[in-house]
Amino acid sequence: MKRRGQTMVLFALTLLLLVLMVTMTLSIGAKAKEKMELQTLADAAAYSNAVATARTFNSVSLMNRALMGHMVAMTGVESLISWSSYYRGSIHGLRKAYNNEPKALYTAIQIPSCACAWSNAMCAKLCKCSTQALKDISNADKDLNQQDKKLENNFKNLDAKAGREARGLQLSTISDEQKKFFETLEKDFSKATLAQKLVDEAKKGVATADELEAVKASSKVNDREISGDASCSGEGAACTRRAADHKLHFVDAAMGSRGYSFVTGRGAGNLILAKLMTIIPRRDLVMQVTNEGSGYFPAEGQLTHSGQEIDATEVWGDDHGSLRMMYTRGQAPCPPMMIGTFGDIKAHVRSNHMGDSSDEHTWTGGSDSDAQPHTMGTCQACPGMWPSHMDYNFKLVTKDKDNWGQPKNYAVIQRDYAKRMKGQADPWNLLFRFRIGSKSETFDNQGIKLTTDGTDISKATALSTGIAYYKREGNFWKEPPNFLNPFWRATLVSAHVDDQGKQQDVADVLGASKAGFTKEAYEALKQAGYEGW
């Protein structure tokens, strides 16, 4: 008799094993896929935060560069005011030069020669030529004085406008715009805005869209890393206002940016010489006009370019030099020509903040009766006229164990499986429970809560860390982080990138109640040697 189906039992058992293996493969594969998706989302969020930080810091740095450009332009205006005043001082210096050697010499000839002119032919000739020379010198002096008075009205009008222009440059501070950029970054960090945007994009087209969430538990750490507060009183990288006693790096940068020679060390005496030659009578010569001057930011009342005295309490323009001329209209037997000199021509404009009334505007032979048009704006960080702006936290640039203050950020993304199947595990999970050994110890893999003690295991958590760091192109790693140059970049790093991360920050972020992860679990993983941060 034939018997059929002997292999059916074996086939059924084999098929059951095959289905079990396929199901396990799908289950493990789905879990691995979801884990990678969650970690990728956290990485994207942390990197986006770092990019946003770097872009904000670059914007702040570029606006500081614009601010320094304004300050350099201000020194240019102050230099023009001072140099224009130096021209008026040169007119007075030329009058003095006529009245020094030439007038003194011809006066010394005239007095005795005219006394004996009635009885001595040579005395008469000397009296005549010296009298004519003194008359010529007097007429030249009147011409120069008339030219100075002619300048007076136009000079006062233009001087006030130039003073207001310099003040306008100082008031064109970018502090408010910097704060707007930074406040946007702080808002994004405190509300996990960028991470949530990425989560919202990831939810599109997903049946269980509400299972993904950007956890705000990291916002406290992120805020601390970037917020240096006003005058660098906080722990973070960005100070919303520079410290009053830490501005010299900006002042030095502005001083070093004064590339135009007219501002840094002008020697424009030949231009003044050419102008003076159009005023004095023909035949007389202006032989030389020297001029040295600069625009800079000295300490209060300090007429000096010295680095130790540069602190931006005031802004100055100053000029100084000398003049040599030749009177060439003398007639024999008097000397036919005579050199005159004046060696101390000076001019300067001194501008201070609104609360200081010591502004000055003087030149050889004259001064501004009201120097207040040169007054700058209200003192922002007294004393001084340097405007307010954001700055990098100077207290952090020596702390290598804190990344020299370069801010890290954490992004925490969660997937809540409890929301997927309304409290039940998804179909790809193998649901089983079995005992181990003779002590009835139970391994529970039935769902999202352990039946032994009710521990919630429904949430999968991914942590990622980004950092904004300062690096100029080339071998400039030793250059400290700053808000002078827009060389901020972004990358992903270990969560233990600094001492705070190793000791407390990760535990605080994961241990927050919203994250559903305990400090104890984190410490246990760390002690077991887990380094997947």
Image: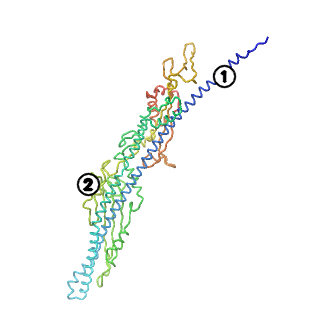
Q: Assess disc 1: are there few (<14), some (14-19) or many (≥20) residues with their C-alpha within 10 Å of its C-alpha.
A: few
Judged from this view, the residue extending furthest toward the right is 1
> Would you place residue 510 above or below residue 174 in this image?
above
* Image quadrant assignment for residue 404: top left
Residue type at mark 1? Answer: Leu
> Would you place residue 483 above or below residue 207 in this image?
below
Measuring from the top left, give residue 392's x and y in whole percent: 41, 45
Q: Earlier in the sequence, mark 1 or mark 2?
A: 1
Measuring from the top left, give residue 346's x and y in whole percent: 31, 64
SS at mark 1? helix
SS at mark 2? loop
Residue type at mark 2? Answer: Ser
Measuring from the top left, give residue 510's x and y in whole percent: 46, 29
- Would residue 27 appear left or right of 246 to someone viewing this image? right
- Residue shown at 46%/26% (left/top)? 518
Q: Which mark is residue 30?
A: none
Task: Look at mark 2 in the image and give the residue it sits on.
Answer: 357
- Would residue 294 appear left or right of 433 to someone viewing this image? left
Q: Which mark is residue 18?
A: 1
- Would residue 521 appear left or right of 273 to someone viewing this image? right
Nearer to the camera, 206 or 320: 206
